[in-house]
Image (cartoon, grey):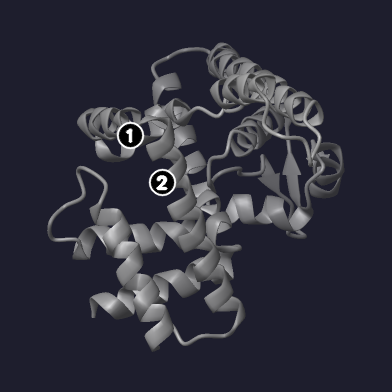
Amino acid sequence: MYSIQEIAKASGTTSRTLRHYDEIGILKPARVGSNGYRYYDDRALVRLQRVLLLRELGLGLEAIRQVLEAQDAQASNGERAGSAEARILRSHLELLRQEQQRLAAQLAAVERTVAALETVEDDAPPSDEHRKKGTLMARNIFDGFDHTQYREEVERRWGAEAYRSSDRWWRGLGEEGRAAWRARVQQLNDDWIAAHERGEDPAGETAQELAQRHIDWLRSVPGTPSDVTGYVTGLAEMYVADERFAANYGGADGASFVRDALLSYLG
């Protein structure tokens, strides 16, 4: 048995985090002493490793809980606990290898971008060689930045057809269309963050104009329901609940501002 302090120190997390994991059912201690102290065994250590791996892969706590519950259900068919955990960790290992490959591609892409930029002086005229290098750079600087990495999650949340439809739409935009789309999203996110930092009222005119822009943006995506009330309400709550979404708005407080403005707009 290991104390909560020992586990926190070994895993690079905190006792407070481990207690929170216990409260939400992600990581239960092996036993709790009469003094209320939590103690963990080797199986708990393995489970904590799985939790940390899933967090590194970008999953929020609710998504991690669902994944662990599904894996536990699969392992409850009489398979020996150690074998089940090894099988599950092998699947995590494959995901980590895929992530490693993706990061390697991103690293190479950024290195190519740096090399291309350093070959052109700031005040140099755009020669044919420079244009050639620019064209080459445009084809390669986004290697490793692949939207398909979220395919499994999208299909789990909204179905395979939703993924196929959005994937066809995204690929059909072309390079210029995708660049314009990214710029539009970034500007919208920046405007949300700026409004929150200025202390705007979620129900005020500025925030409501942003809410209108936000919903117009969502409606431009194929597959968005014509009646957006329930759809946007669910997304607004997800912006706050999922750390990956919240990061787009400067964190949980910014995401809460976006949610409140959207819900106010929807009445």
Residue receiving disc 2: 181
Q: Are marks 2 and 1 in contact (CB under 8 Å)?
A: yes
Question: Residue at the spot x=71%, y=28% of the render?
Answer: 113
Foreground residue, 257 or 45?
257
The label on residue 163 is none
- Distance from the alpha carbon under mark 2 to that under mark 1: 9 Å
The label on residue 173 is 1
Asked whether residue 99 appears in the rendered view, the answer is no
Asked whether residue 65 appears in the rendered view, the answer is yes
Residue 21 position, x and y percent, is 61, 50
Within the image, what quadrant is residue 233 found in?
bottom left
Q: Earlier in the sequence, mark 2 or mark 1?
A: 1
Foreground residue, 112 or 162?
112
Tell me: 220 left or right of 119: left
Residue 229 position, x and y percent, is 20, 65
Q: Residues within 10 Å of mark 2 (few under 14, many from 20)?
A: some
Question: Residue at the spot x=39%, y=63% of the render?
Answer: 237
Within the image, what quadrant is residue 129 found in?
top right
Tell me: 43 left or right of 182: right
Q: Residue furthest left?
A: 226
Question: Residue at the spot x=42%, y=36% of the render?
Answer: 176
Question: Residue at the spot x=27%, y=28% of the render?
Answer: 168
For the image shown, how many numbered marks are present on the structure? 2
Q: Quadrant of the N terminus?
A: top right
Q: Amino acid at mark 2?
A: Trp
Tell me: 18 left or right of 21: right
